[in-house]
Amino acid sequence: MPPKLTLVLVVLFFAPVDAHFPATGELPTFREAPAFRNGRECRNRARSDSVIHIAMTLDATYLRGSVAGVFSVLRHASCPENIVFHFIGTTRRSTELRRIITATFPYLAFYLYQFDANLVRGKISYSIRRALDQPLNYARMYLADLLPATVRRIIYFDSDLIVVDDVAKLWSIDLHARVLGAPEYCHANFTNYFTHRFWSNPSYAASFKGRDACYFNTGVMVIDLWKWREGRYTEKLERWMRIQKRNRIYELGSLPPFLLVFAGDVERVEHRWNQHGLGGDNLEGLCRDLHPGPVSLLHWSGKGKPWLRIDSKKPCPLDSLWAPYDLFRHLPSLFSDS
């Protein structure tokens, strides 16, 4: 049986170099979010089976996107007081970040964990976009180590997305015997995610033998942390990172190790829960349209971020869907009369 209805949000926000606030500058300020309260149908958060855990990374560079993401989750949740956020960041500016989250969301239940960048610093090789090479972008691999053993399941969200549906629906999916659930995209050309050196090596290519491997985006995942720990999946991901460091078998940061370990063994989630790619490609970040079908989550993966395009006065049409969740103070909106 899947866990019942309590919402704990583990928030991991990563800090790409090509985003808007430098790590050494003044942090942005935000308007205080309204208080979101449970309805009568909600169980008390004291019951462990009524909490939803969501993980995101938290850092100065993507802070504006992170705040918008949290706000969107609370705004559409059926039981917002049953949401607990687990933010993962580095020691840098953690006191300031905690203060900003507390001031922006005074009623929010959250924890802030410190991620040791040294865990991955020697394992990261450069990718096609410097933002993907930041140590905190790999923190999602270490959730099972960072979070308390009492947290059995989490939802992982990137910090460049908004949720426009009740996240309890995503939380309640049945993972069956699998470790991880995510929307899959089997029409994508899977071979493009790895280099010729990978496919020409029989032992590497054989890692997909017997698996119906499909692409999935790691910005939205539901993870059984108990099964993850039992299967020692962090070690499996690290093994591929070490191989990449020696032999250059892929180009895209932390995504390919997840494909190598999990593709073909992912519990399928409806596509509505990750309308990704709204930030365009990783090089130019051009405007894109929505994929066909219903939408529960909008994800600006890719180079183009809505707050950057809004600030530059060159927004894409779909950035107007992100703007209402932007709590950044002192910013006139291009999509309103204010």
Image (spheres, helix red, strand yellow):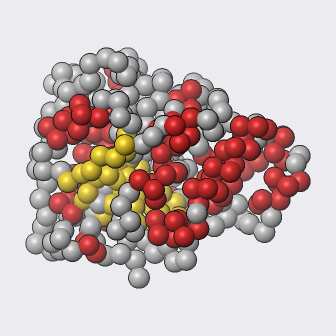
State which quadrant residue 330 falls in.
top left
Q: Is residue 319 above or below residue 192?
A: above
Give me the residue at 48% from left, 24% from top.
17
| Residue 259 visible | no
Give me the residue at 79% from left, 38% from top.
247
Of 84 and 38, the residue lying toward us: 84
Of the 4 image quadrants, the one containing the C terminus is top left
Of 234 and 251, the residue lying toward us: 234
**Residue 181 on image: x %, y %:** 51, 64
Give me the residue at 27% from left, 50% from top.
111
State which quadrant residue 299 falls in.
top left
State which quadrant residue 67 falls in.
top left
**Residue 283 on image: x %, y %:** 60, 26
Of the 4 image quadrants, the one containing the N terminus is bottom left
Of 94 and 57, the residue lying toward us: 94
In the picture provided, is 134 more to the left or to the right than 25? right
Q: Is residue 216 above or below residue 266?
A: above
**Residue 271 on image: x %, y %:** 50, 58
